[in-house]
Amino acid sequence: MRFDLADLDLFRHVAEAGSITHGAERAHLALGAASTRIRHMEEAFGASLLVRSRQGVTPTQAGRTLLQHARTILRQAARLREDLGGYAGGFAGHVRMLSNTNALTEFLPEALSSFLAAHPQVSVDVEERLSDEIVGLIAEGVGDIGIVAATVDPSTLETYPFRHDRFVLVVGRDHPLAGRRKIAFAEVLDHDIVGLDRASALQRFLADKAARAGRPLRLRVQLRSFDAVCRLVECNVGIGIVPETTARRVGQMMAIVPVALTDSWAARALTICVRRLDELPPYACDLVAHLRSGA
């Protein structure tokens, strides 16, 4: 068997994305080239690595074994590049961070900006995921640091407080709900909604809450940022759900009104999670300390 790092990296992306197409995109390969590489890996291994279906792909038992070793080998190769990078004048460290939508849009930009300014030889790769997905991926070693809602079970992970926030409903100033002080999410489902892209972690979370209530989300428009959501809410295209910090910030410039959500999940304590702090390289530990300092 001869697998190079590019093969292992591709297989990891395919397995994590559940799709050869999306895995190829993450690995920056053409679909045909990615399919050929996967087929050659299966031929070299002498066993199927993926179960293919219309819904995507899932690793076989052999594939899961390969995935586990691939993650270890790729992590070690990355650490090798990082340790040698400082001698070559490149980056001395790379941190892979997984974050939920709330932390990614409202808190991490400022925190990462100040950290990276103080650590010019460190790079950080941030990926948006659902909180429960992040816990599993950090436990598997897919990421170094996770930022999750404190409502999820961290299992055996080490956790540290990060920030507090809550989701609120935002409506235009002349909207019928503008006079309300609070509202339940179930009542929100009676109205057209301006939301984030369906692939975003928050939108998937809200869609799940709506499904549990036996109702669909009446998504009128899907956008890429909370600020854009608030702008269309101001224009009465629909109503939106955003972090309270967003509503306060943009409310100084836009004609929107925040309405408190009565649902318990609206309150968001955000938590830092890692497998073991003492297993992280020094620069990743420095980032954890920096994030904790603003808690």
Image: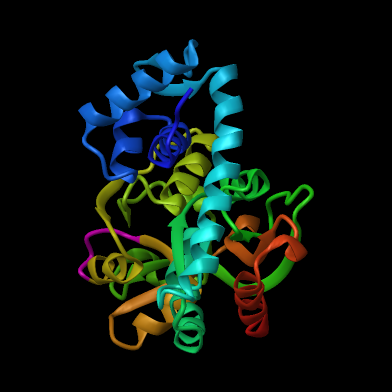
Residue located at (29% from left, 32% from top):
21
- On screen, residue 241 above or below 156: below
Which corner quadrant of the image does residue 22 belong to? top left
What is the count of numbered marks? 0
Looking at the rendered image, the quarter that the C terminus falls into is bottom right
Residue located at (54% from left, 59% from top):
80
- On screen, residue 11 above or below 286: above
Q: Is residue 97 visible?
A: no
- On screen, residue 224 above or below 53: below
- Residue 237 belongs to magenta span: yes
Q: Is residue 60 visible?
A: yes
Report whether 98 appears left or right of 56: right
Q: Nearer the viewer, residue 269 or 12?
A: 12
Report whether 17 appears left or right of 289: left
Task: Please say which color scheme the image uses.
Answer: rainbow
Q: Nearer the viewer, residue 193 or 106?
A: 106
**Horizontal and vertical percent position of residue 179:** 42, 72
**Horizontal and vertical percent position of residue 92:** 50, 73
Give the overall secondary structure of the magenta segment.
Answer: loop
Residue located at (62% from left, 48% from top):
141
What is the span of residues highlighted in magenta in the rendered image? 235-239
**Horizontal and vertical percent position of residue 137:** 59, 46
Q: Nearer the viewer, residue 99 or 31?
A: 31
**Horizontal and vertical percent position of residue 148:** 61, 59
- Residue 49 belongs to magenta span: no
Q: Nearer the viewer, residue 87 or 163?
A: 87
Residue located at (40% from left, 83% from top):
249
